[in-house]
Amino acid sequence: MKQNRLRLTVTTEGRGIYCISQKVCKWVSQQSIQSGLLTLFIPHTSASLLIQENADPDVLEDLNRFFNHLVIDGDPLFQHQSEGPDDMPAHIRSALTQTHLSIPVQENKPSLGIWQGIYLFEHRIHPHKRNIILHLLGE
């Protein structure tokens, strides 16, 4: 068994869904692991990870609209606003999505479906630098 790790830094422009598939797939293809498991973990409480459709950008826009409607910035329901009116909504969005993904690797590439991409989901309004830990284990 072999394993490799990478800390991938992604700069966001604020709230939105950012495709990271190309960076992840390129890194996996450069490793000497043909078959195994890729784990991605985002160590932030106001951003998350998604596997979602990569063909029609309307899907990502609809997801953004849905979350904007579901969790409203500045809602008086929330006490926690230490970093602004988008602070607690960002935590809720993160709680409703995922902070880690597990993807099988076959033939030196992630086994994504034909319409699937890997995304960072930024929940804050302002730009951030987000770290994503990639861990590849296999042979």
Image (cartoon, helix red, strand yellow):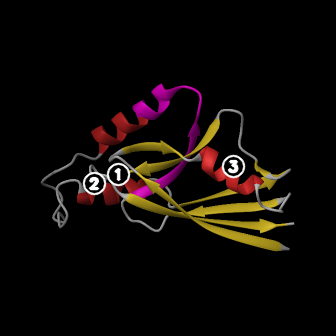
Residue at mark 1: 123
Camera-near label (2 vs 3) is: 3
Residue at point 85%, 74% (across, down): 1
Q: In this view, does 24 lie above or below 39?
A: above
Tally the marks.
3
SS at badge 3: helix
State the residue in front, 106 or 32.
32
Q: Marks 2 and 3, Cα distance to the nearest angstrom?
A: 31 Å
Neighbour tally class for label 3: few under 14, some 14-19, many 20 plus, Cα within 10 Å: some
Residue range of the region highlighted in magenta in the rendering: 47-62
Q: Which amino acid does label 1 sit on?
A: His
| Residue 35 location (% of width, % of height) | 85, 58
Neighbour tally class for label 2: few under 14, some 14-19, many 20 plus, Cα within 10 Å: many
| Residue 69 location (% of width, % of height) | 28, 38
Q: Marks 1 and 3, Cα distance to the nearest angstrom?
A: 24 Å
Q: Is residue 111 above or below residue 132?
A: above
For residue 23, which numbered disc appears in the image? none
Residue at point 41%, 31% (across, down): 62
For residue 25, which numbered disc appears in the image? 3
Q: Report which quarter residue 32 is drawn in.
A: bottom right
Q: What residue type is labelled 3?
A: Cys
